[in-house]
Amino acid sequence: MSLKELGRTGVKVPAIGMGTWGIGGYSTRDTSCDDEAIQALKKGIELGMYLIDTAEMYASGHTEEVVGEAIKPFARKDVFIVSKVLPENLHYANVIKAAEASLKRLQTDYIDLYLIHFPNPEIPLKETMAAMEKLVEEKLVRFIGVSNFGVSLVEEARNYLSNNDIVANQVEYSLLERKIEKDVLPYCLKQGITLMAYTPLGMGKLARNEFLQEVGKKYNKTAAQVALNWFISKENVIAIPKAINLNHLKENAGAAGWRLSRRDVRRISAYFSQ
């Protein structure tokens, strides 16, 4: 698996990690596929996709419980856990409580990267960032990030930090959804902030795209692998596709370790900008 530096931390993370939205349920808890999900996450870690993205919102916290079970066989240092705090929990005391609850569900002592899931204009961002720094100070969180933030909000958040910096911004980004290329992506690149792309396969649409299938023939790769490789050809971008099917996991892992030619990267970019 290809590795990339997280922000300017010096810490390397997989260029392709694992998303978990829908594992263990969506808006509510669903334990019917827990065993399958746990095995899938374990396999993903073994394949080198040891960055796992989750959130307290997912399945009302149950997704974090599933992740906690999946990582048990591994040394804690060998997995990189990302979780997110809900926008309604962004008051100082609530951020601390939310992080502690996530840690309990994950059965771990720390979260590697903790993100604000969505901005909340009704709660002062300064208050939230103070709580995020407190979590780092208490060693409950290693790094701070945001999700679904535009440039101005990222800058505001950074201005409220004294001893840390924003190391990642997680946003929707795929060949079918590229509006962040206008401002968010170049800003993150210039500032040394990792961009984490969720829904990188466009809810599965790109995996069936005939143009990407044609490009993939040259490399003996699938359309999904071409789409993911297009992402990781970008210096500061990592992708977090969700997969529970073992074949899909192997396919996602196989999107790394090789490179599209610069010409094909340009061709793909041009095709999907039409």
Image (cartoon, rainbow, N blue to C red):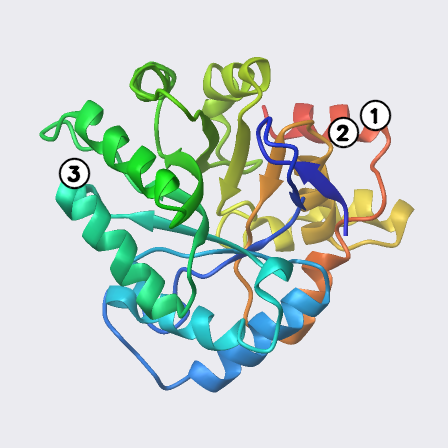
Q: Residues within 10 Å of mark 1 (few under 14, many from 20)?
A: few
Residue at 41% over, 46% down: 141
Give the structural element (helix, strand or loop) at label 1.
helix
Q: Which quarter of the rendered picture does the C terminus lie within?
A: top right
Give the structural element (helix, strand or loop) at label 2.
helix
Relative depth, front residue between 31 and 10: 10
Give the structural element (helix, strand or loop) at label 3.
helix
Q: Quadrant of residue 120?
A: top left
Residue at 48% over, 86% down: 35
Seen in the picture, residue 33 relative to 46 is either above or below; the reply is: below
Spatial CA span between label 3 and label 1: 46 Å
Mark 3 or 1, closer to the camera: 3
Q: Are marks 1 and 2 in contact (CB under 8 Å)?
A: yes
Can residue 63 be seen here? The reply is no
Relative depth, front residue between 202 and 213: 202
Seen in the picture, residue 39 relative to 116 is either above or below; the reply is: below
Seen in the picture, residue 177 relative to 202 is either above or below; the reply is: above
Q: Is residue 218 left or right of residue 167?
A: right
Residue marked by disc 1: 262
Spatial CA span between label 3 and label 2: 44 Å
Q: Tag 2: residue type?
A: Val
**Mark found first going from the N terminus, 3 or 2:** 3
Residue 92's tag is 3
Q: Position of residue 49 (x, y in %)?
A: 65, 58
Can residue 246 be seen here? The reply is yes
Q: Residues within 10 Å of mark 3 (few under 14, many from 20)?
A: some
Q: Is residue 121 left or right of residue 132?
A: left
Q: Tag 3: residue type?
A: Tyr
Residue marked by disc 2: 265
